[in-house]
Image (cartoon, helix red, strand yellow):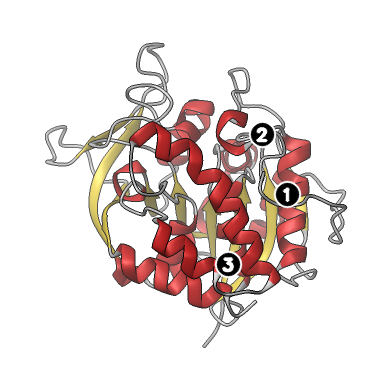
Amino acid sequence: MIARPIIIDCDTGQDDAIMLLLACAAPDELDILGVTAVAGNVPLPLTERNARLMCALAGRTDIPVFAGCSRPMVRDLVTAEEVHGRTGIDGYDVDQPKVPLQQKHGVDFIVETLMAAADDSVTLVPTGPLTNIAMALVREPRIVPKINEIVLMGGAAREGGNTTPSAEFNIYVDPHAAHVVFTCGRPIVAMGLDVTHKTLTTKARLAAIGAIGTPVGNAAHSMLEFYDRHDIEKYGTDGGPLHDPCTIAYLLEPGLFKTKHVYVEVEIHSERTMGETMVDFWGVTKRPPNAHWAQEIDADGFYHMLTERLARL
């Protein structure tokens, strides 16, 4: 098996952290060319540090980590410390990362890596605001054919928004970047709230992760225990949604998901609905589909895979 080359782009909160650990636990399937951090859940100095901490925790000191954009393309930065805590990964004992921060800007890394790649060869996996990806696309349009597909976490349709009544956090933070990405012409798989809200870290699933008993298992359990408290209170469910790892799970086991090929448009004009992902489920706009929108997930299968993979680290 030839490992699939990917670039991960994240705003490292707890769910991004679990996503990174899952990706690091799949070296045979995924060739992580690098991780770029973006401002989102918390400011950039924390997201890049947290990404380096997770790579070190996973024993993957070989993965280079880059700091990207510290603010959205047009709007002021919105963060989510009320969800993720002061560090972005509250529940984890933050220390000095053993993985160094690369000096190159994250957008430069994305552009240079793709320009050196063969056409249709590199998969982008963004799990935060899409600023870094959009800036790379705008700066150097010649990278577009190099992209195999973009598997992202973001958006909401039938489930409704989690930041405004109609907008999901990642898209809301930088809707203009999301507009650039959804109109770039490359294949997109979107893991929005419609599917991630079906991926609940119930008490039993959390206990199974804690039972791994390794430093990685203990860290994952502690971070998720903190992270869940906000959404359990907000939604009244047995466990909070685990958003970002759905992207890596799709790359590893796409059969866990059911998607529909649809046209998606991002609202960038109205303040009332800013960042809404308008999903044309029934083709009423007559516009060509530009994304595979995830609708269903085998949640038990997802958590079984996640727990088994984390136990490998």
Residue corresponding to mark 1:
50
* Label 1 Cα crowd, 10 Å radius (few <14 / some 14-19 / many 20+): many
Query: Who's the residue at 34% across and 71% down the image?
Result: 301
Furthest-bottom residue in this view: 1
Residue 288 lies, with reference to residue 176, above or below; the image says below
- Marks 1 and 2, how far apart at CA: 10 Å
Question: Of discs 1 and 3, which sits in the foreground?
Answer: 1
* Label 3 Cα crowd, 10 Å radius (few <14 / some 14-19 / many 20+): many
Contact? badges 1 and 3 (CB < 8 Å): no
In the image, 154 versus 57, the foreground residue is 57
Q: What residue type is labelled 1?
A: Asn
Q: What element carries label 1?
A: helix
Q: Where is residue 189 in the image (x, y as percent from the top left)?
A: 37, 53
Q: What element carries label 2?
A: loop
Residue corresponding to mark 3:
23
- Marks 2 and 3, how far apart at CA: 21 Å
Q: Residue 42 carries which label?
A: 2
* Label 2 Cα crowd, 10 Å radius (few <14 / some 14-19 / many 20+): many
Q: What residue type is labelled 3?
A: Ala
Q: Position of residue 78 (x, y in %)?
A: 59, 23
Query: Who's the residue at 53% across and 78% down the image?
Result: 29
Nearest to N terminus: mark 1 or mark 2: 2
Rendered-image quadrant of the C terminus: bottom right
Contact? badges 1 and 2 (CB < 8 Å): yes
